[in-house]
């Protein structure tokens, strides 16, 4: 009997791994589209990708797969939910059940509306034409409501959508955690503004030749532990990280000759994502145990390397002398302290992707609140610009002069990504909570960074987080690794400590 379960499990795994082959082909085409593709090639590429997505969707909703998984879920193989087989069966079944809940017509309409929506959004943003964007927004939310209804939910339709990005997370819990964060952050940001202190930002805006930025970025990525034998880095307008196979992780970055932070911190961010991918068990590629848990956990890895490591004083004790050698014209007369202060400048701003470590989360909070109001229908689409301005005014003390720098700044809503934004803040929260424990368990990370040692942290992350793939849900993993449920406190301790010293805040 148990032998026959083993056979069914092997068949289900083979089925999933074959789907992963197709997905990896799709990802390869997607990577090429965003890095290399000539303009005129876009149309045929869209056809290739749509064809592959159709095949993948068919496979993922294959009734035969569903029968196998139904049988396996009741079998002794699934008894231990944290074993490889138990976790793979649970997650494959969950994915199958979700995929089959959506009618084919809705899947197609969501995909059509996302690609058309992005196209209209680009033009509407360029022309600062909110009424044009409003049509896209109304359509998006109508379809997302239908999608939430098809998935089903207990408390809030938002829960059903959140499940696509942060499985197991619920709006009631998230609201509490983010409200705690907001209540602690808003006064901190106000205190910083009232301090009247400001670093000299101009030192980051001198001339940093692209070729040398690229050399420095590769050096940093490699020293912190990104494996270039199993990955590469290329250039794009919008940086991302993607895996094309178990030993092929692609990072991208972008360069601004007159702003140091863009490329280096972008590279470290994507390298953090990349090291997570490289730490997943390669022999489970194509199965849930070989795959990342959630967007929030993924983002915790990128934010940790970008902010908690890359914007730390100890990191620059090690790297600043090298940076000064590589960029002598720009940095010869700059002290490491002035540089460290400049890369940690806190300033309320209108654009999320340019926000600093502290104010960033307030941009997310507003989107989270607006998304729920839009989904429930409490906020009519036409009122989005005024609601946006009100929230920016109350959280950050500033408001946009136009909608292009307001509610039209991000691609997410037009691309049908509702419930995605909170995963950015979850990433920041998880990152600080993990980092605090790693620091305790590894006996002082900053002393290690000063000596240029990053391998212990990377190995700790690999052991505690990466190698488990989807064995645990995000919330479970946080409790297992840190002994506590998710909290805003580690992030606030980090921000208060660092910014308190830089801005000479009382207390
Ligand atoms: Zn990221």
Image: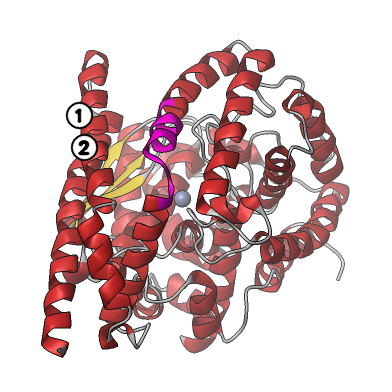
Q: Residue at x 34, y 70 (%)?
A: 469
For the record, the magenta segment spans 101-112
Front-most of residues 70 and 222: 70
Secondary structure predominantly adopted by residues drawn in magenta: helix
Provide the secondary structure element on which disc 2 rests.
Answer: helix
Asked if marks 2 and 1 touch (Cβ < 8 Å), the reply is: yes
Q: Is mark 1 within 8 Å of ligand 1?
A: no
Name the disc covering residue 3, or none: none
Dot 2 corresponds to which residue? 52
Residue corresponding to mark 1: 48
Residue drawn 60% across and 58% down? 153
Q: Give the vertical position of 426 relative to 392 (above or below).
A: below
Q: In the rendered picture of this protein, how many numbered marks are placed on residues?
A: 2
Task: Describe residue 105's horizontal placement relative to residue 62 as left or right.
Answer: right
Circle 1 crowding by C-alpha within 10 Å: few under 14, some 14–19, many from 20: few
- Image-based side of 339 in relation to 321, left or right: right
Provide residue 443's location: percent of width, then percent of height. 49, 87
| Vertical comparison of 136 with 209: above or below | above
Q: Is mark 2 within 8 Å of ligand 1?
A: no
Residue farthest toward the top in the current orientation of the protein:
127
Q: Quadrant of residue 88?
A: bottom left
């Amino acid at each position: 009997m148990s032998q026959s379960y083993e056979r069914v499990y092997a068949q289900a795994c083979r089925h999933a791994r074959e789907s992963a082959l197709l997905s990896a082909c799709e990802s390869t085409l997607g990577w090429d589209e965003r890095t290399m593709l000539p303009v005129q090639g876009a149309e045929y590429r869209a056809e290739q990708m749509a064809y592959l997505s159709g095949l993948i969707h068919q496979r993922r909703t294959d009734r035969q797969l569903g029968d196998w998984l139904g049988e396996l879920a009741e079998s002794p193989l699934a008894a231990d939910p944290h074993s490889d087989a138990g976790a793979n069966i649970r997650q494959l079944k969950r994915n199958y059940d979700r995929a089959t809940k959506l009618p084919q017509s809705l899947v197609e309409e969501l995909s059509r509306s996302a690609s058309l929506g992005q196209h209209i959004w680009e033009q509407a943003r360029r022309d600062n034409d909110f009424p044009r964007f409003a049509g896209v927004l109304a359509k998006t939310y109508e379809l997302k409501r239908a999608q939430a209804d098809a998935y089903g939910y207990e408390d809030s339709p938002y829960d059903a959508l959140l499940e696509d990005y942060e499985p197991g997370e619920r709006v009631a819990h998230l609201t509490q955690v983010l409200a705690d964060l907001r209540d602690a952050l808003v006064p901190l940001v106000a205190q910083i503004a009232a301090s009247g202190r400001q670093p000299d930002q101009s030192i980051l805006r001198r001339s940093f030749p692209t070729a040398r930025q690229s050399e420095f970025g590769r050096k940093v990525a490699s020293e912190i532990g990104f494996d270039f034998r199993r990955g590469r880095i290329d250039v794009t307008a919008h940086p991302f990280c993607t895996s094309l196979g178990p030993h092929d992780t692609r990072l991208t970055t972008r360069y601004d000759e007159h702003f140091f932070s863009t490329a280096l911190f972008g590279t470290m961010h994507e390298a953090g994502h990349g090291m997570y991918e490289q730490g997943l068990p390669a022999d489970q590629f194509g199965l849930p145990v070989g795959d990342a848990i959630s967007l929030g956990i993924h983002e915790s890895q990128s934010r940790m390397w970008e902010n908690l490591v890359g914007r730390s004083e100890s990191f620059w004790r090690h790297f600043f002398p090298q940076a000064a050698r590589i960029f002598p014209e720009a940095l010869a007369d700059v002290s490491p302290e002035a540089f460290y202060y400049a890369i940690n400048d806190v300033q309320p701003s209108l654009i999320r992707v340019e926000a600093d470590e502290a104010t960033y989360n307030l941009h997310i909070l507003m989107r989270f609140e607006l998304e729920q109001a839009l989904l429930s229908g409490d906020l009519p689409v036409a009122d989005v610009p005024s609601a946006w301005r009100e929230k920016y005014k109350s959280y950050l003390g500033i408001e946009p002069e136009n909608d292009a720098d307001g509610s039209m700044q991000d691609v997410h809503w037009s691309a049908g990504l509702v419930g995605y934004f909170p995963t950015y803040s979850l990433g920041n929260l998880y990152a600080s909570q993990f980092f605090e424990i790693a620091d305790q368990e590894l006996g002082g990370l900053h002393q290690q960074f000063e000596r240029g040692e990053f391998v212990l942290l990377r190995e700790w992350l690999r052991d505690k987080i990466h190698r488990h793939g989807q064995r645990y849900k995000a919330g479970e993993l946080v409790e297992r690794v840190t002994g506590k449920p998710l909290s805003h406190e580690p992030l606030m301790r980090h921000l208060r400590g660092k910014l308190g010293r830089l801005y000479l805040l009382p207390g």
